[in-house]
Image: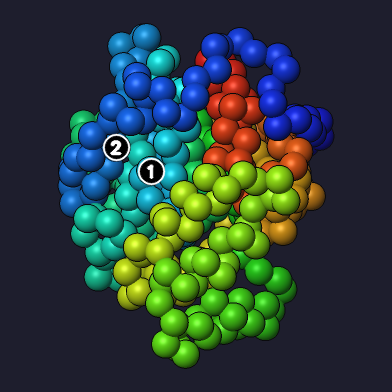
Amino acid sequence: MSVTPVTHAMSATSVTHEPVPADDSTGANSAQYKTAGGIEYLAQGTAQDPHSPPIICLHGIGGNSSSFAPQLAALSRYHRIISWTMPGYGHSTPLATVDFSTLSQALADFMHALKIKRAHLIGHSIGGMIAQELALTQPERVQSLALLATTSAFGGRDDRFKDNFLAARLKPLDEGKSMAELAQQFVPALVGADTDAPTLNAAIAGMRNIPTQSYRAILACLVTFNRYQDIAQLNMPVCLLAGAEDNTAPPATMQKMAERIPDAEFHTLAGTGHLLNLEAAEACNQILLKFFDRQ
């Protein structure tokens, strides 16, 4: 399948919906933390069409439910939007075994607890991997996928890349450093060069409170992901977004991924790194709103 890439500047120039700032009082800041099925989450908004499936956001390794604050603020004007806190993070119950099967089943159980039969999923980084896993194993639960800064498989052709990755990420912990120190070390390397200080500081704050045991477990899970051969079976619309300066999920990798998916569109956000939904929130929101409007 041929996919035409679309590159967007950090400020959207073609807008169908009125832009909404992340601190808008009708958006994320009026959402309240709740719990369902052992999962802590934020929820906001009401769908304009009562029969429309809600949107569920799945954060990355260094995040939590508030990592989608700009999306909660903007998308909640037109949709019901929910942002979970991954098992083992925040006040969400840890899993006895952490792998993509148990994580995707935890998502399915969370949806069941909220009486949601089918949802649009937005997944960032490992959240995008969990979204792919559910879409492939329980496709009846997924209306559409928006995959942000993620891939269909982790690492290279052998285990050396995985081993080196884990060693680099875990070495500071093994040397006695705290998660706060790790956040300060790793997060600045994830964002684009033009990322402002409030965005960077918010991302650092999100990572610093992750329990060390949960961080170790989710890293070990991350390096096992491989759905490269399976994504051609995705039978729902898929929107892929890459940060132009992202070295973790590079645009070239995500474009190749899009070309393997039957019904896919691919976008690159200029000037952004791995945390593109925070770095270029307005442009990201406009792409997502247009995508969901078509579903």
**In what quadrant of the picture does the N terminus appear?**
top right
Q: Is residue 81 left or right of 253 when viewed as pictured?
A: left
Residue 245 shown left or right of residue 126 in the figure: right
Q: Which residue is drawn at 44% across and 39% down?
A: 68
Q: What element carries label 2?
A: strand
Counting from the top left corner in percent of width and height, residue 294 is at 56, 16
Q: Pointer 2: residues within 10 angstroms few (<14), some, or many (20+)?
A: many
Expressed as whole percent of the image width and height from the top left, the position of residue 72 reads 41, 30
Label 1 Cα crowd, 10 Å radius (few <14 / some 14-19 / many 20+): many
- Marks 2 and 1 close (CB-CB < 8 Å): yes
- Image quarter of residue 160: bottom right
Q: Which amino acid does label 2 sit on?
A: Leu
Residue at coordinates 56% horizontally, 70% vertically from top-left? 185
Q: Residue at x 72, y 51 (%)?
A: 193
Q: Decide which of 118, 72 is in the foreground and name it.
A: 72
Q: Which mark is residue 42?
A: 2
Q: Position of residue 57 (x, y in %)?
A: 42, 39
- Please, what is the three-letter code of the amino acid marked with disc 1? Ser
Residue 2 visible: yes
Q: Depth check: give the residue in front, 25 or 104.
A: 25
Residue found farthest to the bottom: 175
- Which of the marked residues, 2 or 1, is nearer the chain's N terminus? 2
The quadrant in which residue 53 appears is top left
Q: How has the structure been colored for display?
A: rainbow
Residue designated by label 1: 66
Q: Is residue 98 visible?
A: no
Q: Is residue 234 above or below residue 17?
A: below
Q: Could you tell me how far apart the alpha carbons at marks 2 and 1 are, in whole angstroms?
A: 8 Å
Residue located 42% across and 56% down the image: 205
| Secondary structure under the numbered disc 1 in the rendered image | helix
